[in-house]
Image: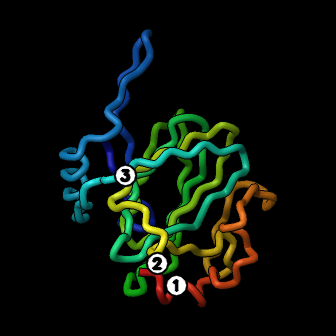
Amino acid sequence: MKLIQTSLPDVVIIEPTVFSDDRGWFMESFNEAKFHTALQALDLPTPRAFVQDNHSCSAKGVLRGLHYQRAPHAQGKLVRVTQGAAYDVAVDIRPASSTYLQWVGVELSAVNNRMLWIPEGFAHGFVALEDDTHFMYKTTDYYDKSSEGALLWKDPALGIKWPQPSDFIINEKDSDRSEERRVGKECPRCV
């Protein structure tokens, strides 16, 4: 496995080793010891144990996010796409961070097999680039509705450059009608 730091050094792209032959391919999608060793080699902290796995399926153009959980149920996420493709975004919401409110976007797909490690203290969202996109992720804490938070996916203060036109398919929870999701209103309470 190869780890690549992004412009937000705590957010890391993971490129697994894939073994291919005429039968197909094999890869180790997660190995805790190797993951921790690779993070330590980058002088990054190791996460708490993963306790929950989530799986969503989205049509092309579905945008989910930008979600996070506050302490005491903050979540680190190890995300991947097992079918289709998605543009995945992480936003630093740690007020004391030198990269506060900066974002990074990475394409994850069943073809490139990349994963993204998003530690606690980041909001997360993605847009499906293909129909029937299967998005899977491990979390370091259980979902807790009372700890839930979100930022508006198109907040101008964030300036995220999403890869598709703005006619996304968005549920009511993530819509722009929720004024309290803007950075100035929500982020002082992010973490």
* Image location of residue 80, percent across then percent down: 47, 45
The first of marks 1 and 2 along the sequence is 2
Q: Which element is circle 3 on?
A: strand
The image position of residue 142, as x and y in percent, is: 37, 60
User: What's under tag 3, amino acid-wise?
Assistant: Gln
The colour scheme is rainbow
Question: Seen in the image, is 184 located left or right of residue 94?
Answer: right
The mark lying in front, picked from 1 and 3, is 3
- Depicted 70 relative to depicted 169: above or below: below
Residue 52 image label: 3
Label 3 or label 2, whichever lies nearer to me, is 3
- Please name whichever residue, 163 or 80, is drawn nearer the observer in this view of the structure: 80
C-alpha gap between disc 1 and disc 2: 7 Å
In this view, 159 is above or below 25? below
Judge whether residue 13 can be spotted in this image: no
For mark 2, what is the residue?
A: 93
Looking at the image, residue 64 sits to the left or right of residue 8; the answer is: right
Three-letter residue code for mark 1: Cys
- Exactly how many numbered labels are in the figure? 3
Is residue 161 visible to us here? yes
Tell me whether the residue at label 1 lies in contact with that at label 2, contact meaning CB atoms closer than 8 angstroms: yes
Sooner in the amino-acid sequence: mark 1 or mark 3: 3
> Mark 2: which secondary structure?
loop
Assign a secondary structure to mark 1.
Answer: helix
Position of 182 with respect to 113 (left or right) is right
Give the left or right position of residue 8, taking residue 131 as reference: left
Which residue position is annotated with label 1? 187
Write the residue at 72% across / 69% down: 175
Q: Are marks 1 and 3 in contact (CB under 8 Å)?
A: no
C-alpha separation, residue under disc 3 versus residue under disc 2 = 22 Å
Q: Is residue 21 above or below residue 81?
A: above
